[in-house]
Amino acid sequence: MRKEILVALRATLVTLILTGILYPLATTGAAEALFGERAGGSLSHNEAGQVVGSELIGQTFAAPAYVQGRPSAAGNNGYDATSSSGSNFGTTSKKLRDRAVADVARLQKENPTAPLPIPDALVTASASGLDPDLPPEAALWQAPRIARARNVAEDRIRAVIENRTQGRDLGFLGEPRVNVLELNLALDQQFGRPLPLPTSAPVAGTR
């Protein structure tokens, strides 16, 4: 019995060292060496070099000078990376209908000169609630509002969006998309950060 226990303890110790220490260190080291930026979380930086988020995790942008992402049900205020989830509302849910109706009304109010219909992505939440991307048409739909807020020609806003649009992976996987955070950073780099709203006005999710 004693011999069997010692063999089991040695096997446990060796397995612990191999799979719990050496293997994680090796894979982490390889990831850092080969894909350093992605292994570090695909972090995004502003012009001052400050980390402002990750290109893999969506966040809220409410200021009119920025592209807004999809609705999010993650956390109380959306885009909470610690509470990734969808709304789980069914297609017959009154709460889902009411939320969509409210989003449509808000979007029409904030984008009075944008064409109809409103792109689906702007009124439908993703399963994770943290989707960092938008279809190009959903970003372009917001161009009139952004151009007005930044006091620049709409064509210039559309050019930045089109320049930041990513195609299908390997040419056939997925759909064309634009990363909302990276696009908003590009807008700031191209046209400067917009002037802040008066302190009496509520500001949420600005970057």
Image: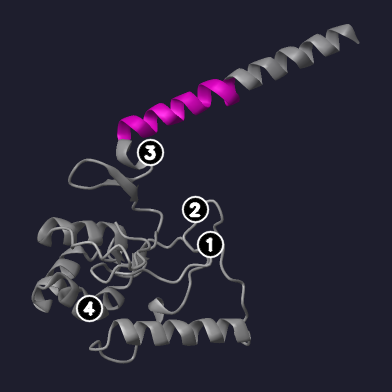
Q: As rendered, which of 75 and 91 lies closer to the eye?
A: 75
Rendering coords of residue 74 (x, y %):
53, 62
Which amino acid is tagged 2? Ala
Which amino acid is tagged 4? Arg
Q: Quadrant of residue 151?
A: bottom left
Q: Do residues under tags 1 and 2 come within 8 Å of each other at their CB atoms?
A: yes
Q: Dot 4, crowdedness within 10 Å: few (<14), some or many (≥20)?
A: many
Q: Earlier in the sequence, mark 1 or mark 4?
A: 1
Q: Dot 3, crowdedness within 10 Å: few (<14), some or many (≥20)?
A: some
**Residue 82 in view, yes or no:** yes
Which amino acid is tagged 1? Ala
Give the foreground label among 1 and 3. 1
Residue under label 3: 39
Q: Quadrant of the C terminus?
A: bottom left
Q: Which mark is residue 74?
A: 1
Q: Which mark is residue 81?
A: 2
Rendering coords of residue 155 (x, y %):
10, 77
Give the foreground label among 2 and 3. 2
Q: Do residues under tags 2 and 3 come within 8 Å of each other at their CB atoms?
A: no
Helix, strand, or loop for circle 2? loop
Helix, strand, or loop for circle 1? loop
